[in-house]
Image (cartoon, helix red, strand yellow):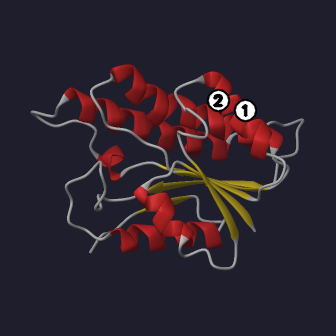
């Protein structure tokens, strides 16, 4: 299987190391700046016709509100929709966050609130894309999957949970396209 991982994230690199039987390509912000529509469109044009699985791991948590919304929500939804249109079959996996289970709490900082709501939007978009129905159109054989991992050691988290569990859970989705939503358990 040809797998495209979008985002040179800690998780993306960890799951690539588990995909021994597959051909994996990771693209990063240096390849395509996901804050720009033109770069996202180019990414889809460059890969949509020769991959079997797209894994979107991109994410950011910084002080730039525009960047947070654009990278964490807008580019992900755009890429999911465009890959879905152009692929004839396969899998699209969006890495969301366990933050979808609680987007706000007393004292949450604005960046974390924006991040959590953006990831919730991605999860909901994927759930709804799975439910869509066009009576005059046969559905494509494309699995839309969402992974909502718990926190793990990364540049975006102070968690002490090993990334190995999250990488294994994401790999489980790659190997099981009939699972639509997987919520992580870091125990």
Measured as percent of width and height from the top left, residue 31 is found at 61, 40
Question: How many badges with numbers are in the image?
Answer: 2
For residue 133, say whether it is visible: no
Q: Residue furthest bottom?
A: 21
Give the side of residue 8 with respect to residue 67, left or right. Answer: right
Q: Residue at x 16, y 37 (%)?
A: 105
Residue 62 vertical position relative to residue 95 in the rendered view, above or below: above
Q: Residue at x 63, y 31 (%)?
A: 78
| Quarter occupied by the C terminus | bottom left
> Which residue bears the numbered disc 1?
42
Measured as percent of width and height from the top left, residue 129 is found at 64, 41
Q: Residue furthest left?
A: 107
Q: Residue at x 41, y 58 (%)?
A: 10
Residue 43 vertical position relative to residue 91 in the rendered view, above or below: above
**Disc 1 from disc 2: Cα separation:** 5 Å
Measured as percent of width and height from the top left, residue 156 is found at 29, 48
Residue 159 vertical position relative to residue 165 in the rendered view, above or below: above
Residues marked 1 and 2 touching at CB (< 8 Å): yes
Q: Residue at x 75, y 68 (%)?
A: 1
* Circle on res. 39: 2
Q: Residue furthest top?
A: 66
Q: Residue furthest front?
A: 30
Q: Residues within 10 Å of mark 2 (few under 14, many from 20)?
A: some
Give the side of residue 153 with respect to residue 96, left or right. Answer: left
Quadrant in the rendering for residue 40: top right
For residue 100, say whether it is visible: yes
Q: Residues within 10 Å of mark 1 (few under 14, many from 20)?
A: few
Q: Secondary structure at mark 2?
A: helix
* Circle on res. 70: none
Q: Secondary structure at mark 1?
A: helix
């Amino acid at each position: 299987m040809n797998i495209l991982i979008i985002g040179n994230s800690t998780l993306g690199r960890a799951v690539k190391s588990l995909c021994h039987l597959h051909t994996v390509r990771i693209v990063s912000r240096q390849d395509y700046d996901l804050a720009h529509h033109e770069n996202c469109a180019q990414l889809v044009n460059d890969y949509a016709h020769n991959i079997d699985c797209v894994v979107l791991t991109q994410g950011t948590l910084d002080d730039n509100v525009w960047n947070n919304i654009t990278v964490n929500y807008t580019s992900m939804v755009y890429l999911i929709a465009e890959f879905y249109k152009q692929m004839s079959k396969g899998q699209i996996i969006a890495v969301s966050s366990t933050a979808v289970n609680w987007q706000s709490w007393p004292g949450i900082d604005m960046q974390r609130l924006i991040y959590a709501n953006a990831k919730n939007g991605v999860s909901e978009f994927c759930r709804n894309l799975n439910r869509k129905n066009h009576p005059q159109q046969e559905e494509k054989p494309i699995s839309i999957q969402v992974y909502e991992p718990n926190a793990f050691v990364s540049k975006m988290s102070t968690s002490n949970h090993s990334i190995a569990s999250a990488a294994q859970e994401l790999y489980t989705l790659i190997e099981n396209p009939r699972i639509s939503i997987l919520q992580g358990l870091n125990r």
